[in-house]
Every structure is written in C-alpha cells, then in structure tokens.
Image: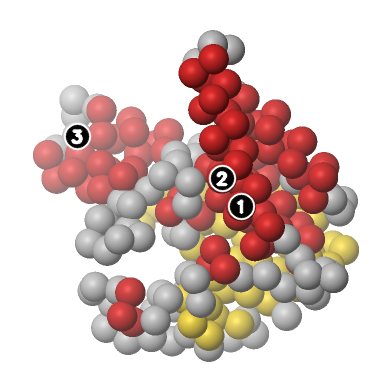
Amino acid sequence: MKLHLGCGQRYLEGYVNIDYPLSEHSVQQKSVADRFDDLKELSFEKGSIEEVRLHHVFEHFSRTTACAFLAGWNSWLAEGGSIRIEVPDFEKTSKVALSKWSSLKEKSVAIRHIFGSQEAHWAVHYQGYTSLLLSSFVELYGYKTASIKKIAYLGTYNIELFAKKVSSISKEESDKITAAYLKNFLLDSSPSEMLMLDTWINEYRLQVCKTFASE
C-alpha cells in the first residue's frame, strides 16, 4: 500500500489518497480522497506500507508532531520503503522576502509561503525547512536521503525530498532520538527551558502513541 497524505484536489493513481472531508476546507471545491481522516489519528500495521507521500503538508505540523510522524512512518514502512516530502524552501523564500530587489507582490507571496495561506484552521506553517535541515531531520529516524529536488512554482520555491528506510527504529529508540533533537531548540539549560523541553517531549509522546504501528 502507498499513502498520499493530505491529498487536497490532487489524486494520485496507485495510492490511497487521504485528507480531511470538505467540511474542514474553506476554498477547496471538490474532494478526491479515497478516505477521510485526521492525519494525526492515522496508524497502520507494522511493515504494511510501501511509501508515504506528502506535498505541502509536513510543514503544517509542529516539530513534536513531525518527530512522531517520522518515527511512526518508519514503523509502518516495509524494509526499503520510502517517504516523499515536499515543503517550502525556507532559505530561498526568506531571501525573496528580505531582498531589497523584490517587489511588494513578491515579498507578500514569500511571506504567505513561509507562514501559510491561513484561510483554514490548519492552513498555517509551523516549521521552516532547508534542504539540509529536512534531510538531516529525516535521517535521524532511520531514513537515507536518495534525492532532493528544487521546484519553483508561480513565484514560490520548494524542496522535494525522497528518502528510503534503511533501518527500523523502535519506539524506545525514537523517544531518545526525539529528546536529543528537541534539545537543539533550547536557549539554554535554565529551569524554564528544561520545563519547555519536558512539555515538548510530552506532546511528542502523546502523538507517537497514536501514530506508531500496531503489531
């Protein structure tokens, strides 16, 4: 089975296309989904999935949820399975937004691309990714980057990463990986920052329990 998560109006043959129902969309005119689901509630059997694919969906989730997704998808994927993730290119888009040579229109489109279109409750962006940040992030969870493409579309700049599962990561290993990763976002080791880390880890654990594969 191949999964196309957050399919919107783009139907991919050979995939199970999954999205919110139309009631959760404000400008989408039709649904092509094979199945309606909240992506945060999805789980599949261990080793049952060949590919997980997302186009402009991954950035809509907090970093703790993104960690839980990568851990969970690893558990869903068969050996040699793959993930394909397309997100805004934060580095290129930020340069457009900050350049004195960009027009107001170009800057405005860039700001929208960084922070989301914001017409629906889910249409905001929680994370900014560069090629290096995205690749190094997914590789923490047992994947190996096979290719990264740069894509330009109507004044927006994007990254598409294709990665293969090269090792299985247990839930316990994922917990340790995530704690170490989230520490990078701390300002220092003060009590308030350590409380922040505990909060992030608890949020991650709540999500990974939902996402990690059923046996």
Helix, strand or loop at label 3? It is loop
Q: Nearer the viewer, residue 38 or 158?
A: 38
Q: Quadrant of residue 211?
A: bottom right
x 43%, y 54%: residue: 60
Residue 64 visible in the shown view: yes
Q: Secondary structure at mark 2?
A: helix
Residue that mark 3 sits on: 102
Q: Which residue is mark 2?
A: 203
Q: Which residue is mark 1?
A: 206
Tell me: residue 154, above or below residue 144. Answer: below
Work out how far the residue at label 1 is from the one at label 2, CA to CA, in angstroms. 5 Å
Q: Is the residue marked by circle 1 packed among few (<14), some (14-19), or many (20+) residues within 10 Å?
A: few
x 62%, y 81%: residue: 15
Instruction: Find the distance from the CA under tag 3 to the CA under tag 2.
Output: 39 Å
**Which quarter of the image is occupied by the C terminus?**
bottom right
Whether residues under marks 1 and 2 lie with C-beta atoms below 8 angstroms apart, the answer is yes
Between marks 3 and 1 in the image, the one whose residue lies nearer the viewer: 1
Horizontal placement of 115 versus 205: left or right? left
Q: Amino acid at mark 3?
A: Ser
x then y, percent, for residue 110: 27, 43
Q: Amino acid at mark 2?
A: Glu
Helix, strand or loop at mark 1: helix
Can residue 156 be seen in this snapshot? Answer: no
* Comes first in the chain, label 3 or label 1: 3
**Point 57% across, 57% down: residue:** 85
